[in-house]
Image (spheres, helix red, strand yellow):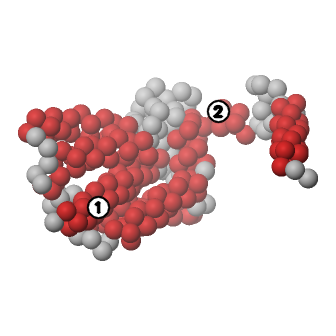
C-alpha cells in the first residue's frame, strides 16, 4: 500500500469521529447533569462567595486546587535543582 | 552590571506601589469579584520581574532565593493545614462559613459586597497568592541570576 492511501484512511476515520461527536452533542442550554444548577442556586448561601468559580475552586473541589499548587511547587523544585549549582 | 538607567529604575519604583496594591486587591476580593489567589499572585510576580530587570544585581540581597523558598513552603503548608482543620467533617470542609467571627458573616441570597464572608476561602486565597508569588519569583530569580553568571564566565 502506498502512503497516500494511509492518509485518506486516517482522514476518513477522524472525519467520522468528529461528525459523530457533532451530531450527538446535547442542545445548547440543556446540560447533561444538574450539578451546575445546584452550584448556581446554593453556592452563595453555602459558601458566602459571590464568585461561583472561586467557591468551586476552594470549597467544593478543593482537592483539585491542592493538586494545582503541588504541580507549581514541583515545577519550582525542578528549576531549583537545575540552577542550584550556580550562585 | 548595575541594571538599567536611572529613568528605568525610578519608573519601576513608581509602578511598584500600584502593582502590589492591585495584586493584593485581586487576592483579597477573590470570593467577591473575578480573580483569586492564582491571578493576584501572578500580578505581584510581574512586579518582581520588573524589579529584577531594572535593578539586576542590586536587588539580589532583597530577593534572596532562601527567603522566597521558605515563603513558598510556608504558604503551601498553610494551605494544607487549612484543609486539614476542617477534618471534623471532610477534607477541605469550609468550617468557618456562616458561623460569625472571622470571615463568617451570614449570607442569604446575593452578597452585596461584604468582604467578611466566605469562611476559609479568603484565607486559602491568601495562602495560594503567597505561594504563586514566591514560586514565580523564585523561578525568575534562579533563571536570571543562574544564567547570567554563566554568560559572564564565558565572556571573561
Q: Residue at x 35, y 41 (%)?
A: B43
Give percent across and percent down for residue A45: 58, 36
- Which label number is shown at residue B11? none
| Left or right side of A57 for B9 | left
Residue B12 seen in the current view: yes
Of badges 2 and 1, nearer the viewer stands 1
Q: Marks 2/1: CA distance?
A: 48 Å
User: Cβ–Cβ below 8 Å for labels 2 and 1?
Assistant: no
At label 1, counting other C-alpha atoms closer than 10 Å, the crowd grade (few under 14, some 14-19, many 20 or more) is some
Residue B122 seen in the current view: no
At label 2, counting other C-alpha atoms closer than 10 Å, the crowd grade (few under 14, some 14-19, many 20 or more) is few
Q: Quadrant of residue B137?
A: bottom left
State whether residue A58 is above or below residue A71: above
| Left or right side of B95 for B16 | left
Give percent across and percent down for residue B60: 17, 59
State whether residue B74 is above or below residue A52: below
Q: Residue at x 24, y 61 (%)?
A: B151
Q: Residue at x 39, y 64 (%)?
A: A79
Q: Which residue is mark 1?
A: B147
Give percent across and percent down for residue B142: 30, 61
- Image quadrant holding the N terminus of chain B, namely bottom left
Residue at far front of view? A2
Amino acid at each position: 500500500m502506498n502512503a497516500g492511501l494511509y492518509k485518506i484512511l486516517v482522514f476518513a476515520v477522524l472525519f467520522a469521529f468528529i461528525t459523530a461527536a457533532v451530531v450527538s452533542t446535547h442542545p445548547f442550554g440543556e446540560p447533561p447533569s444538574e450539578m451546575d444548577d445546584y452550584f448556581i442556586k446554593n453556592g452563595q448561601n453555602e459558601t458566602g462567595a459571590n464568585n461561583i468559580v472561586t467557591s468551586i475552586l476552594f470549597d467544593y473541589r478543593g482537592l483539585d486546587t491542592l493538586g494545582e499548587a503541588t504541580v507549581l511547587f514541583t515545577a519550582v523544585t525542578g528549576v531549583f535543582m537545575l540552577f542550584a549549582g550556580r550562585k | 552590571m548595575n541594571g538599567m538607567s536611572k529613568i528605568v529604575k525610578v519608573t519601576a519604583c513608581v509602578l511598584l506601589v500600584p502593582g502590589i496594591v492591585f495584586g493584593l486587591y485581586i487576592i483579597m476580593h477573590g470570593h467577591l469579584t473575578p480573580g483569586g489567589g492564582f491571578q493576584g499572585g501572578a500580578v505581584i510576580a510581574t512586579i518582581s520581574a520588573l524589579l529584577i530587570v531594572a535593578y539586576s544585581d542590586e536587588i539580589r540581597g532583597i530577593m534572596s532565593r532562601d527567603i522566597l523558598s521558605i515563603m513558598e513552603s510556608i504558604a503551601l503548608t498553610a494551605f494544607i493545614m487549612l484543609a486539614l482543620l476542617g477534618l471534623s467533617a471532610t477534607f477541605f470542609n469550609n468550617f468557618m462559613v456562616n458561623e460569625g467571627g472571622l470571615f463568617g458573616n451570614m449570607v442569604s441570597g446575593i452578597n452585596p459586597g461584604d468582604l467578611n464572608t466566605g469562611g476559609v476561602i479568603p484565607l486559602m486565597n491568601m495562602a495560594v497568592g503567597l505561594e504563586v508569588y514566591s514560586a514565580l519569583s523564585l523561578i525568575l530569580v534562579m533563571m536570571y541570576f543562574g544564567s547570567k553568571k554563566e554568560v559572564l564566565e564565558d565572556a571573561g
